[in-house]
Image (spheres, grey):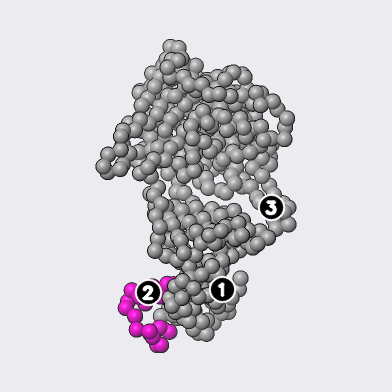
Amino acid sequence: MSLRARIAAPEEGGAGREDGHLVAVYRAKLLEEIDLAEMSSLAAAERRVRLERVLGHIISREGPVLSSSERSQLIRRVVDEALGLGVLEPLLADASITEIMVNGPDSIFVERSGRVEQLPLRFASNEQLMQTIERIVSTVNRRVDESNPMVDARLPTGERVNVIIPPLALTGPTLTIRRFPRAYTLPELIGLGSLDEQMLMLLAAFVRARFNVIVSGGTGTGKTTLLNALSGLIPSQERIITIEDSAELQLQQEHVIRLESRPPNVEGKGQITIRDLVRNSLRMRPDRIIVGEVRGGETLDMLQAMSTGHDGSLATVHSNSAEDALMRLQTLGSMSEVQIPFEALKDQINSAVDVVVQLARHGDGSRKVAEIALLISHGREQFRIVPVSRFVPRPVGPDRVVHGHFEHLPLPRPVAEKLYVAGEPLPPSFSVAEAIDVLHTRQAIG
């Protein structure tokens, strides 16, 4: 969209008509005063400063009479509408907001510190919201209309964006923006209460000893955050390939290749799936493969890679328990076009997966490692899981804050021996079981 079109785009009436009318009036006055050729040559930050200065002169010269705060707010809104995303601009500038949810023009929610709250903001109309959506998707060369009513994309600044519009969305154009998560270290996660030091030491030992780790959890439990933190434990000399739908991982090692899937274009062609990338990555001589989330036939390729020379790989999966994670891997693996018996997938999973780290999000918004479990079954036998660490919550008190403690259980001797051979000492809180304690072993139906 040209600079003139972006500034001059009309704002329709509806809810908030008077406020919107004032913004539209001063946007038109701003267009009359500025030199578009000069503005186009400026950087984005300089352009904003110039527009704010010119608009300030216009308001001083022509009115209306406003207080300092009202004047600043009007200037910000006009410039946000001209160059940015309107009412969403201050939300995107707020680092405490992790997700923005627009459910039609009259309903805007955000997530802060794990809690969802509604804001007293609204778009003036469906048309204004659609203009904002079109501006967002145009930055990634996508379009949204009745023939293409759903868009899922990543902005150049890293945010993940999902759009769905009528007739599919009955409440009006719906926009969800997931902020690029900050890369937390494992010590920082200890400070947040997500795990304790003994669990950190155990997870670090697993990663350095090249155990294959699956991070499991529901939506918003912090899977990507933990995956990113765990990846920081991989030795810097190793060649790491990351594969994601929307690139969120922020690895600090030098030898990292980042791959991102691609949706089909408007003609329905050119799609590159996670499975395509997993298959291609096996030809790139990786030491470790990290898959942001397995959700389809690529699961079989990932399992085969984990069990045939790519030890120490990491992936996430959506599920509500460690048992659930294994069953979901089996189901997803069966979605491949390779005709492999469902029972044979147990062999693949038992051979590939060493550790399942289950995450949970509690009622107070806190995210914790609910359980660290080891998969000890072999061949096509039923999945057998040994929990070695878990969070034990206490009853919620009047403050509605979730308190509890992390419990540490003995490690199976074969696992302890594998860590010993890799030169990884056991954390002090973890003993070694002479034989697998049947009280602590769980079976999953498979």
Q: Quadrant of residue 256?
A: top right
- Residue type at numbered disc 2: Ser
Image coordinates for residue 209, horizontal then vertical, percent: 50, 26
* Image: 61 above or below 347: below
Task: Give how far apart the Cα atoms at labels 2 and 3 are.
Answer: 43 Å
Image coordinates for residue 27, horizontal then vertical, percent: 49, 79
Judging by the rendered image, the residue that carries numbered circle 1 is 6
Residue 72 is inside the magenta segment: yes
Image coordinates for residue 344, horizontal then vertical, percent: 66, 23
Circle 1 crowding by C-alpha within 10 Å: few under 14, some 14–19, many from 20: some
Q: Secondary structure at mark 1?
A: helix
Instruction: Please give the label number shown on residue 264.
Output: 3
N-term-proximal mark, 2 vs 3: 2
User: Residue at the spot x=55%, y=29% of the render?
Assistant: 326
Residue span colored magenta:
57-78
Instruction: Please give the label number shown on residue 315.
Output: none
